[in-house]
Amino acid sequence: MLRILILFLNYLVIVSAQASCETIRVNGEHNWFGVSYRESSQAPLQGLAVELANKVFSDVGIKPNYQAMVPWKRQFLQLETGDLDVIIAAFYNQQRGNKFVYSEAVGVEYSSAFIHIEERAAFSDVESLVGKRGIQLLGSSFGDQFDSYAKQNLTISTMDDLDRAIRLIALKRADYLLYATHGGRQKIATSEYADSLVDLQPSIIKQPIYMVMSKSSPCLEYLDDINRAIRLNRDDF
């Protein structure tokens, strides 16, 4: 009986801490190199967005509780069900905007089409992607305007492995990879395909990056404080 009582009291402590937002359950994309990524499935989340989030939550007085790696689309489902409080870096689209609460912008990201260097003559702008085989990471969104254009005009497959996607372009088994410009350059520069791939310039997409919060998160009461801390720290992004 005493053991049951102790377990129950511990449960109440956990629930109380969550309800008062002493901790905030955090996750992020594991394939966004440089911004929010993991070296392996068991490795901690790292990148510029993690560094900024840690400063923001420290300023607000909330302890971040980083969750284990789960697929990108499942993280948004967890936001929707209230099993996750915040994704630390994501783009906006209307579907997400209808379901979640967005912070102020934490930074800006450019995205490009990465192509084989020998195929540069076949690419010039967004229209030159028509009729070619594209790849993007599972769950990626490049804003409502581009997503709509891509759905109507482009042929794009999805996968959840950035290394494999890069390899497919290098081996010419696909024609282009849609990915963040700076992160893609960094990732490719450290790969065996550094001399094989280039990104289409100028970058084809420019988007603000935001923190995305669950509407059922008790930490929403600190949104103004979070936004204030973002303004103070985002120059470091």
Image: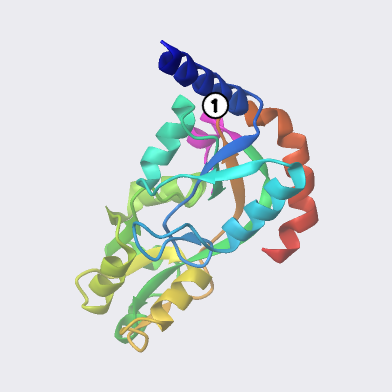
Q: Is residue 49 left or right of residue 112?
A: right
- The boundaries of the magenta stretch are 91-101
Return the residue at label 1: 14
Say which residue appears at 48% left-offset and 52% top-offset. 142
Say which residue appears at 55% left-offset and 22% top-offset. 15
In this view, 11 is above or below 79: above
Return the residue found at the far bottom: 195
Say which residue appears at 45% left-offset and 60% top-offset. 37
The amino acid on which the numbered mark 1 sits, given as a three-letter code, is Ile
- Give how far across and how far down residue 6 sits, in percent: 48, 19
In this view, 195 is above or below 161: below
Q: Is residue 224 left or right of residue 79?
A: right
Q: Is residue 197 left or right of residue 44?
A: left
Is 92 in the magenta? Answer: yes
- Give how far across and how far down residue 126 sits, in percent: 44, 64
Viewer-side residue, 17 vs 158? 17
- Give how far across and how far down residue 35 sits, in percent: 53, 62
Is 28 in the magenta? Answer: no
